[in-house]
């Protein structure tokens, strides 16, 4: 996993937990937090710690009934997952006395019918019934006066006409998930959900959207991902009548061209059209002047899935753009983005590019530049002008044949990126780092795997904030004396540096007592030295694999090797 991905995931988890644990009246519980001290996994443990239990997650539990739950006055959410033996009518009766219960889940439990007593959960805001055998919701669902979110994916036996008739009476409903249900048609009654803000219809088989959906006048987000039969041109025509629509997801829907009618949904701020086989963008896209996020990327690393070679000139009019993901498009040159002064994130990885256009230096607000796996031989000096960059990804292509273009060196201006936190340069053939690189004192993650480094700058210890350092598969002989100043370093990979001075390396690393993970695999080191190393770093997980650990025997079958 890339350091940038780790940081992004960490930020995501923090954001999710913050929203879950903010005990204000406006916060909604949308799922059970799995790694929290306030989440319990057994009923008896929860009852023994009633004041600490805010969430209860029961998975594959053999309980058939619940005991008295009234002591759990702080309980905000409960999930029954794979609980096929539970008497849910009795369970709801026991839970109805709880004053703060907002989230209720019965998922993957072969539930054929939801008890009408669900209406006794008077504070319920989110009802998750994913992957059951439901045909209909009880009439009493309309009495759930606080219910805002209903999650119903993978209930393919649902009777839609009756379902929407009952949901239409639920005036508090804001989010409805009907994804993965194999629906071939949507009823006109969907238009009765006038307060709906988010609608997930992904992974269904319908061809058209009913025109009545334009009556969902509060709708802000719609998910139509993996709807392979959908006539997206017709869908755009219908959706253009919803003036509140901000986000649309049409990812992985086998779409080759976006229709001109897309430009009529002028309220759009976010379009996810990733994972398709697009060959062009409509001229009308320039009308989407509110568009902030556009993802037309692809994870197809062979560069054969998406081939938008030329962008319409009107694309430059999307001046509100903040995030643009073009990943996996085979581009000879980038479209003109010089007017997009609000652009913060640009992903042009796997685009077959030979150079970065010079106008990128005018995008002074750029924070994330992902341009890995292209064919750069030179990184321009102006890269140092992107003063707000936090993440710069410039990994090369891993090919033993060095005739494939790679970066040989970095410009001195790289040191001007004072705010840079993540720099990835894996799979290039860089031999020497510029002295200016030590000026990147905000750096938290540095990836230099599979290069040709022989030596590191003497002042390498200046990276005082560095947490992750990957130097795998280089040709280092020694580490600089300042290396032991990396007091925040938590993960270090020195594996596959066979010529490194083991004793000197141990001296440089053994004082980094905060290390959590150290990889020195395939470095010749005696058992005695390794034992001493482990004593010096007792809290560090040390990996030291050798050829003896490789058990591959090509002359034997898999069964024989076992």
Image (spheres, helix red, strand yellow):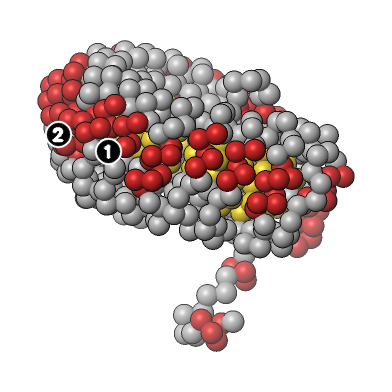
Q: Quadrant of residue 360?
A: top left
Counting other residues with Cα less than 10 Å from the Cα at mark 1, is it few (<14), some (14-19), or many (20 or more)? some
Nearer to us in this view, 169 or 359: 169
**Residue receiving disc 1:** 188
Give the mark nearest the N terminus, 1 or 2: 1
Q: Are marks 1 and 2 in contact (CB under 8 Å)?
A: no
Residue pictured at 61% horizontal, 54% vertical: 81
Give the answer, above or below, for where 109 lies relative to 418: below
Nearer to us in this view, 558 or 155: 155
Nearer to us in this view, 431 or 549: 549
Residue extending furthest toward the right:
48
x and y percentages locating residue 505 in the rendered image: 68, 45
**Residue receiving disc 2:** 259
x and y percentages locating residue 471 in the rendered image: 55, 44
Res. 220 visible in picture: no
Residue pictured at 54% horizontal, 60% vertical: 110
Q: Quadrant of the C terminus?
A: bottom right
The residues tagged by marks 1 and 2 sit, at their Cα atoms, a distance apart of 24 Å
Nearer to us in this view, 68 or 208: 68
Q: On the picture, is 158 further left or further right than 517?
A: left
Element assignment for label 1 = helix
x and y percentages locating residue 514 in the rendered image: 75, 37
């Amino acid at each position: 996993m890339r350091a940038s991905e780790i940081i992004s995931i960490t930020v995501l988890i923090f954001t999710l937990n913050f929203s879950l644990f903010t005990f204000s009246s406006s916060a909604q519980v949308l799922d059970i937090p799995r790694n929290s001290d306030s989440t319990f996994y057994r009923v008896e443990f929860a009852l023994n710690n009633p004041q600490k239990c805010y969430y209860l997650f029961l998975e594959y539990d053999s309980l058939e009934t619940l005991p008295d739950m009234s002591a759990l006055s702080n309980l905000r959410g409960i999930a029954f997952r794979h609980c096929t033996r539970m008497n849910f009518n009795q369970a709801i009766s026991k839970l109805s006395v709880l004053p703060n219960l907002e989230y209720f889940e019965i998922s993957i439990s072969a539930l054929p019918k939801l008890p009408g007593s669900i209406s006794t959960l008077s504070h319920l805001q989110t009802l998750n019934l994913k992957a059951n055998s439901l045909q209909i919701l009880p009439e009493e669902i309309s009495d759930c006066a606080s219910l805002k979110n209903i999650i119903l994916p993978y209930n393919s036996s649902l009777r839609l006409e009756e379902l929407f008739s009952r949901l239409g009476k639920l005036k508090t409903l804001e989010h409805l998930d009907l994804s993965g249900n194999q629906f071939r048609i949507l009823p006109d009654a969907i238009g009765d959900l006038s307060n709906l803000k988010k609608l997930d219809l992904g992974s269904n088989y319908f061809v058209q959207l009913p025109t009545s959906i334009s009556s969902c006048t509060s709708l802000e987000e719609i998910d139509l991902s993996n709807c392979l039969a959908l006539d997206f041109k017709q869908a755009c025509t219908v959706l253009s009548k919803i003036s509140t629509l901000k986000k649309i997801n049409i990812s992985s829907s086998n779409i080759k061209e976006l229709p001109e009618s897309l430009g009529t949904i002028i309220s759009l701020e976010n379009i996810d059209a990733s994972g398709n086989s697009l060959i062009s963008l409509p001229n009308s896209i320039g009308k989407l002047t509110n568009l902030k996020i556009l993802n037309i990327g692809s994870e197809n690393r062979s560069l054969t899935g998406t081939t938008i070679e030329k962008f319409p000139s009107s694309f430059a009019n999307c001046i509100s753009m903040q995030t643009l993901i073009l990943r996996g498009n085979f581009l000879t040159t980038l479209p003109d983005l010089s007017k997009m002064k609000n652009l913060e994130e640009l992903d042009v990885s796997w685009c077959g590019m030979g150079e970065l256009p010079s106008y990128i230096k005018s995008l002074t607000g750029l924070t994330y530049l992902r341009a890995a796996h292209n064919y750069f031989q030179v990184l321009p000096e102006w890269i140092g002008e992107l003063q707000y960059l936090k993440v710069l990804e410039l990994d090369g292509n891993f090919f033993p044949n060095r005739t494939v273009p790679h970066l040989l060196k970095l410009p001195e201006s790289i040191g001007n990126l004072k705010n840079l936190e993540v720099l990835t340069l894996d799979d290039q053939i860089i031999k020497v780092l510029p002295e200016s690189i030590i000026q990147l004192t905000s750096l938290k993650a540095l990836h230099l795997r599979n290069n040709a480094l022989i030596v590191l700058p003497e002042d390498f210890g200046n990276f005082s904030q560095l947490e992750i350092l990957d130097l795998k598969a280089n040709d280092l002989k020694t580490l600089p004396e300042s290396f032991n100043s990396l007091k925040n370093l938590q993960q270090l990979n020195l594996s596959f540096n066979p010529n490194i001075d083991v004793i000197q390396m141990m001296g440089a690393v053994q004082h980094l007592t905060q290390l959590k993970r150290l990889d020195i695999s395939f470095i010749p080191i005696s058992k005695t030295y390794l034992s001493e190393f482990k004593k010096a770093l007792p809290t560090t997980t040390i990996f030291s694999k050798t050829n003896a650990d490789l058990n591959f025997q090509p002359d034997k079958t898999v069964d024989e090797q076992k």
